[in-house]
Amino acid sequence: SKFVNDEWMIKNGFLNDAQEHRPWWWNIKVQKLNLSAPLILLPEVSCQKAIEILQEKGYDQAPVVAESGLILGMVTLSNTLSSVQDGNVEFSDPVTKVTYDQFSKVGLEDSLGKLSCLLENDHFAIVVHEQMQFSGNGGSSTKQTVLGVVTAMDLLTFVSSNDKK
């Protein structure tokens, strides 16, 4: 039944959203949000250190990215704190024990409409840029770089500060 759900089709790139009655900002690109550079945690960071870093820097969540550039997921302050308090993890455990490995990604060229659809079900989306990476033997691969984390509050702030009533 997903194929009859326009939002699912748009989110997964099967349908271009050309419907009428969309807000003025619907087709604006994600890059217009002017997101700040994200705080990124490496997988070996302890839960204790992750909590300290997030609190000190004033972040609620951060992507966990391996040194190779592979995006492993997102860690949130609330999930980390509750996991430690519930006894499911120790302060000394690596942050990967509390990392959400299911998350949405958007590119700079994606529309705010697509982002809006993603944020209806997710608390955040990771903004990524894909680039080709070539090795010495001529082989290539695609690497994703994290450019930011976007929340519904970021979208709301953009829309309200640029409202075209």
Image (tube, rainbow, N blue to C red):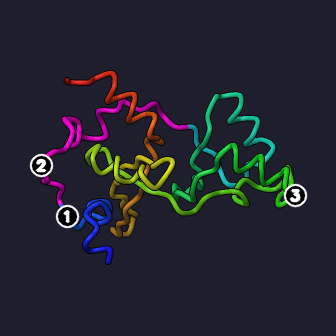
Magenta stretch: residue 80 in it?
no
Which element carries disc 3, helix, strand or loop?
loop
Residue 12 percent location from the top left of the image? 31, 65
Q: Mark 3 sits on what residue?
A: 87
Local SS, label 2: loop
The prevailing secondary structure element of the residues shown in magenta is loop
**On the rendered structure, is 163 left or right of 67?**
left
Relative to residue 107, is residue 151 depicted above or below?
A: above
Q: Residue at x 35, y 70 (%)?
A: 139
Magenta stretch containing residue 24, yes or no? yes
Q: Earlier in the sequence, mark 3 or mark 1?
A: 1
Q: Label 1's element?
A: loop
Mark 2 or mark 3, whichever is nearer to me: 2
Image quarter where the N terminus lies is bottom left
Amino acid on which disc 3 is placed: Gly
The three-letter amino acid code for the residue at tag 2 is Glu
Tell me the number on the disc at residue 6: none
Q: Nearer the viewer, residue 103 or 1?
A: 1
Q: Which residues are magenta?
A: 16-38
Foreground of the two, 148 or 78: 78
In the rendering, at what x and y percent does residue 40 appear? 58, 43
Which residue is disc 1 drawn over?
15
Depth check, front residue: 126 or 123: 123
Q: Distance between the Cα atoms at labels 3 and 1?
A: 44 Å
Going by the image, does 124 lie left or right of 101?
left
**Residue pointed to by mark 2:** 20
